[in-house]
Amino acid sequence: MYFYAARQPILDKDKNLFAYELLFRDSIDNVFPDIDGDEATTKMIEASKFNLGIGEFTGNKPAFINFTLETLSLGYANMLTTDEVVVEILETVKPGKKLLAICKDLYEQGYTLALDDYEHQKVWVHFFPYIKIIKIDWKISTIEEIKEVKQAIVNFPDIKLLAEKVETYDEYNQALELGFELFQGFFFAKPEMIKTKSLSPSQIAMAELLYETSKPELDLISITAVFERDVTLSYKLLRYVNSAIFRRSNEISSIKQALVTLGSQELKRFLGLMFAINVNPDKPSELINSAMARAKFCELVAKDISAPIDSSIAFLTGLLSLIDAILDEKLETVLEKLPLSQEIKDPLLTKKGVLAELIQLLEFIEHAQWDKTTIVMKKLGIAKEKVIKDYNQALSWADEQSQMTNGK
């Protein structure tokens, strides 16, 4: 059984990752809300507890999971620990004595409770002592409605407001000014502003290396020369090669030996990650994590599509699919600065071809638009079970890489 869910990041006001919301689907063919809410929550708990493991899917961050009154009554929230779940009470649940008693009990056990898509009613004030997070749909709520909620919780300082469906930096900044502390949406995955940004010498060196490694045949002499011109990059290479995952019979005595130890595939992966991580350290870590996950997904799927493509090319294309947001520049401007092969540039710029369709498939999965994923998978000739398996594996790999590069 595969875990059919998308995870959407929830960031704090400093754009650090706070948690993920897990958006469940019965399978890739089904589109919520055709699935009964009780059934959706039941299968989410089953899949996360007994199959994949919720921590693997969320990188050990808390998971917001929707609960109906029925699933709360059955005690499903208690199947997960207080550290791994935020109990999100669906907007369709009516406030009443039974729900109030459940909320009080969960609160006393140490669970974090959230109200989903909140629209203020006075009766909810009785629940506020047990609620930590109130989610407000940014797309449908007016400023007046938001201010009404703020006034209602003024005596409950522990309650945080979460703005969901925040898609632009203007919306993020507006919500920030209104006192929101948590944000859900893909505003961080779009360029914050269009501006000119020069690359540092180290970043230029990495761009050169990306170009070299995108060639069918590696030129070891040229690649070694670039590393030898950049002390910082050489240090990172040697530190990476020193990892326990590489079995070395001898100590490394030269840059060339380090490159040979890594091998072609691992070198390409290392360079891609270093470029994405270091090109703009001020960007949210979740953006870099998303780029890594895209890269790994494209690499895994590349060999299974009806017209297989080079996995190294697929990896770099996936990695660079968010480079405009990482650098806060137009994609065209960014790619002009990078000496990459047209095999990588073309799908990103023209949105055409197999690699472009892979990126589109990823975007649909990230937004849990499962009906659209089915169309793209048919075009690419990929089995849905393989897509979900590779997507889950890519997320886990990206989380591991992120922890390793951040020294955690």
Image (tube, helix red, strand yellow):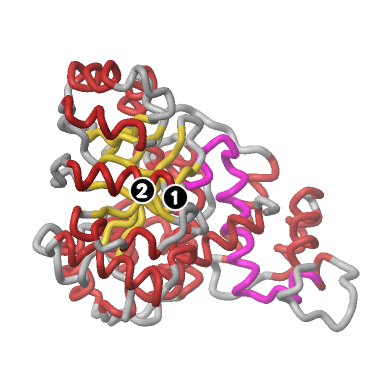
Amino acid at circle 1: Gln
Question: Left or right: where does residue 138 sit relative to residue 389?
Answer: left
Q: Within the magenta stretch, is there residue 136?
A: no
Q: Which quarter of the rendered picture does the C terminus lie within?
A: bottom right
Question: Left or right: where does residue 299 sit relative to residue 134?
Answer: right
Amino acid at circle 2: Asp
Q: How much space separates mark 1 and mark 2, taking CA atoms?
A: 6 Å
Say above or below: 67 vs 183: below
The quarter holding residue 372 reads: bottom left
| Marks 1 & 2, CB-CB < 8 Å contact | yes
Residue located at (52% from left, 58% from top): 60
Q: Nearer the viewer, residue 69 or 374?
A: 69
Q: Nearer the viewer, residue 99 or 54?
A: 99
* Region of the chain picked out in magenta, as a range: 258-286
Residue located at (18% from left, 75% from top): 378
Q: Is label 1 in a helix, a strand or a loop?
A: helix
| Residue bearing the label numbered 1 | 109
| Residue 205 location (% of width, % of height) | 67, 49
| Residue 242 location (% of width, % of height) | 80, 68
Residue located at (18% from left, 70% from top): 374
Residue located at (63% from left, 74% from top): 264
**Disc 1 crowd, CA 10 A, few/some/many (<14, 14-19, 20+):** few
Q: Nearer the viewer, residue 139 or 155?
A: 155
| Residue bearing the label numbered 2 | 105
**Disc 2 crowd, CA 10 A, few/some/many (<14, 14-19, 20+):** few
Q: Which quarter of the rendered picture does the N terminus lie within?
A: bottom left
Say above or below: 13 vs 4: above
Q: Main secondary structure of the magenta part?
A: helix
Q: Is label 2 in a helix, a strand or a loop?
A: helix
| Residue 321 location (% of width, % of height) | 41, 53
Whether residue 356 is visible, yes or no, is: no
Question: Left or right: where does residue 225 sit relative to residue 81?
Answer: right
